[in-house]
Structures are given as structure tokens and as C-alpha cells.
Amino acid sequence: MSDSSFPVDGDEYVPSVEDNIAERLLEISDEDADQRAQSLLVGLGDYELDDEDAALLARGDAEYDDDEDELIPPVLAIIGRPNVGKSTLVNRILGRREAVVEDVPGVTRDRVSYQAEWNGRDFTVVDTGGWEHDAKGLHARVAEQAEIAADVADVILFVVDARVGATATDEAVVKMLRKKKKPVLLVANKIDDFNQESEAATLWGLGFGQPWPVSALHGRGAADLLDEAVSKMPEHSAYGGLIPRGGPRRIALIGRPNVGKSSLLNKLAGSNRVVVDNTAGTTRDPVDELVELGGRVWRFVDTAGIRRRQHMAHGSDYYASLRTQSALDKAEVAVVLLAVDEVLSEQDVRILQMTIDSGRALVIAFNKWDLLEEERRRYLEREIDTDLSHVEWAPTVNISAKTGWHKDKLVPALDRALESWDKRISTGKLNTFLGELVAAHPHPLRGGKQPRILFGTQVSSRPPRFVLFTTGFLDPGYRRFITRRLRETFGFDGTPIEVSMRVREKRARKK
């Protein structure tokens, strides 16, 4: 029988009795904990396990290499003026409907990049968009925003509506692309049958060689186009290259436009800038900056690129989102800046969620704190309780990016978050914790059944990920309860942690 009635779906399980699990764990020796785990592991052999389970369990507490350099797949950018079929082409490449498609220029999309595969080659597709309905000087706007996408690309698909032909907007994009000196494939879209292919021939004059006649809507010509695009891709992204592991810890300063990222970086760098690190193969420099803080060197990733291109956002957060994701990809910890003199926005919350989803360590910096008035402070406290309760585990720092006030407080917060991000719990300690927790707070009965946790193991750090072998599905609220208690008991401050299940059935007995 459970010690608590189970809440509605979506709420965390709340036990009705206290426990002293942290104290109990201190009383149990590592040897006893390891013996318990070994006994549970032997018992797990009575259940149906697959090859992946066996490989995971065989590793035990063996070291796994978190310091290997990581390859970034090549990037394919889809560029073109509004309403030429870019998102339809993205969906065709992905083989699924991911990008939003509407017959209206200016459809806003939160996601800007997608993982794709063609003939065994992995790559990232960057879909350009975020156009404004009433944009003035649209051809210049398109060229500027396309330039941001071109900067991160290894190969570019320049999409033109072949039925309309080249427009002034297309010509503006052409001028920009010629300067980039990157492989460009000219896509003559909306060619639905052979009879229309003569319309594609008129696009030779744009100077990008053979136009590729394609119907993104029906798929005609898409395979040949992709074959050619993949053949021009490098092994890994020249924009990102290798994500270096080891060395100075890597920080991304992120936040919505005009929140103080550039001011903070400038104040942190100041006279403490060590060197500008020019990453090979990138078209934007400098990319990384090495800065001395707290007597150590830190690498601020992609912040220069974010700063330099910020003026090109033109009121749309679409490309800010692209640059934010790019910085997160190469970082270990994100410092998310929030301006306390303004109401916390949906965009602030979305950037925080993007950081969590990326699996990076997290520090929240409340900027302009020195200017905070008492009345605004009361409203801010309510906003934090309402909008930031899901990241209450993140260290917070109150700073002024403009003056540098409290910038020294960043280092302890970064150290705390990264220590948690790196942390590993031994299999013995983890299973002892799970045993004590379940004994004190059993999973509520559902339909007369009570799923059991058979065994748990940490499969990775950076961020910490745990797998539980169970006899049935654990309610979402109970999983959130386990996650919270893991965080509290072992001190996972400043890092997202992931707890997943593998439901396994008992082997049938041989007669």
C-alpha cells in the first residue's frame, strides 16, 4: 500500500511521510552497497534482456571517455525569398513533415535546424525563414538574413520559384552568395513535370551553373539534388569543425536580444582577454574568446559571432535562435541572461528550455540587478515563482553586465554547475538509494499492480543520465519524484538530469 494517494497526471508524486534516506546512505559502506547492487544484477538475469541491455550492464562503473573530440555533421542551408517552397523542400529532405508550411510569406518557426540523413550521410538542415509580413525593403532583408544562414553552411541550396523566374530579391541573394565562395546548388522549384523544365533553363543566367529542376511538393528531382549536395559536403562541418573536449571549460552567454550578452562579454574580457582563437574553416572571426576569470582561463564559445550578427535580427528572434543553438552545441555550460527591469518573457523561458534540451549545465544571471527598484522586485519574485520553478535547481547570480558589478560571483556558480554536470554516481550507491527510496515511498498501486525497480545504472555524465530497469511503467509523477530526490541527495545543482525506463518481463520458465 502506498503512503500517499497519487496526484493527477502531470503533478509530481508527493509522499505523506518524511524519510532519512541521506543519513541512511552515509551509514552504508561502499562495499555493502556494491554487494547489494551485485545481488540485484544477478536477479536481473531472470528477465528478458536484449543485446543493448547486456552491453550497458556489462560496462558497470567502467570509465567512459567524455573527453573525445566531437564531430559536427556538415550543414546544408536552404536559402531563398519567401514562398518559394523552402519549408516544403526541407520536409522532402527529411522525409517527414517537420517545418511549418503555409502559403503565406512570413511563417514563424521556433525550430531552425533539423538532423537529416541521405545514403548513409548524416547532416544538419538549416531552414531559413522568420520573414515579417510587412517587411519593407524585403530583398535587402532576405539577403541579410540569408547571409547568416550561409555563414553556418557547408553547402547551400538556393531555391527559386522557376515559374516566376528570378526577381530583384533573388538577385540580391545572388550578390551575397557569390562573396561566400561556398558550394551553391541552384534549385528551380515547382517544376512538376517534364514540360515545365524549359522554365528552369532561364535560371542559368544567375551564374550558379546548372539549375536543378525539382518539385519539392511531389518529390520530383529531389533524389538527384540530394545526391549532388551530399557529394559536395565535407566530412564534418567547416563552420563548427571539431568540438574540442578537455582544455578550458566552454561557456555560452545566451539570452534574448539586447539583454546584455555583449556588454557582459566585453566587461569580462576587458584586460583579461588572453587570446582570440580563430577556429579553422569558419567564415566568422573571432569565434571563441579565451578569458581569464578567477585565476583560470575559460573559453567563451561563439559569442563573438552572436555579437557581430546581432543587428541583423531585425526584430525577429528566428536567427537569434539559430545562433543560440549553435553556441549551445559547442558549450559545456550556458549562462542565460535575464533582464530584471523587464517582465520575463516567453522567449526567456524558451531559451531556458533550449538549454535544458541541449543537455548543458546552466547558470542563470539576473542582469541589471543594481538598477532594480523595490516595486519591480516584488513582481520579479512572483515571475520567478511562476515561470522559473522548473529550473529552481540552477545556480543564480545577480549582476550588472554594464558595470561589471558581481561578475566575480559567476565563477563559483559555473564551478558548481559543471561539477554536477560531470558527476557520476557508483552503481552500488545508486541502487542503495533506489532501494531505500522505494522502501520508504512505494510506487502507488494502479489497477491492482505495483511496478518495481529491478536495477538502476548511470549510463553517462555531461549531463547525468540514468536508466532504470523496471517491471512496469512508472507514473510520470513518480519519475519526477525520483529525479528530484536524486538531485537533492547527490547534489546535482546546475545540470539537467535524465531518468529513463526499460520495462522488462520475466523469462518464461523452461518446462
Image (tube, rainbow, N blue to C red):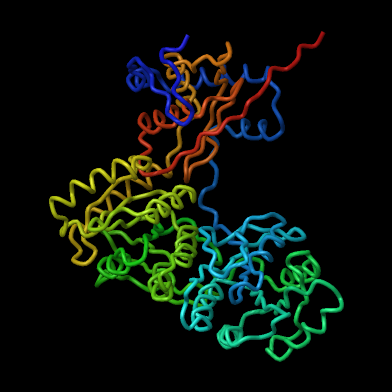
Taking the view exactly as shown, the residue that stands out farthest to the left is: 374
**Location of residue 251 in the rendering, given as x and y in whole percent from the top left corner:** 39, 58
Q: Nearer the viewer, residue 88 or 444?
A: 88
Above or below for 87 versus 210: above
Residue 339 in view in this figure: yes
Q: Is residue 450 left or right of residue 272?
A: right
Q: Residue placed at 52% from the left, 61% from the top?
A: 243
Above or below for 273 versus 165: above
| Quadrant where the image shows the C terminus | top right
Q: Residue placed at 55% from the left, 75% from the top?
A: 281
Taking the view exactly as shown, the residue that stands out farthest to the bottom is: 205
Q: Nearer the viewer, residue 229 or 29?
A: 229
- For residue 18, what is the image quadrant? top left
Residue 179 in view in this figure: no
- For residue 402, what is the image quadrant? bottom left
Taking the view exactly as shown, the residue that stands out farthest to the right is: 194
Q: Residue placed at 69% from the left, 82% from the top?
A: 164
**Location of residue 167 in the rendering, given as x and y in whole percent from the top left corner:** 62, 86
Q: Nearer the viewer, residue 360 or 422?
A: 360
**Location of residue 476 in the rendering, given as x and y in whole percent from the top left corner:** 50, 29
Q: Residue placed at 61% from the left, 29% from the top?
A: 502
Above or below for 10 versus 367: above
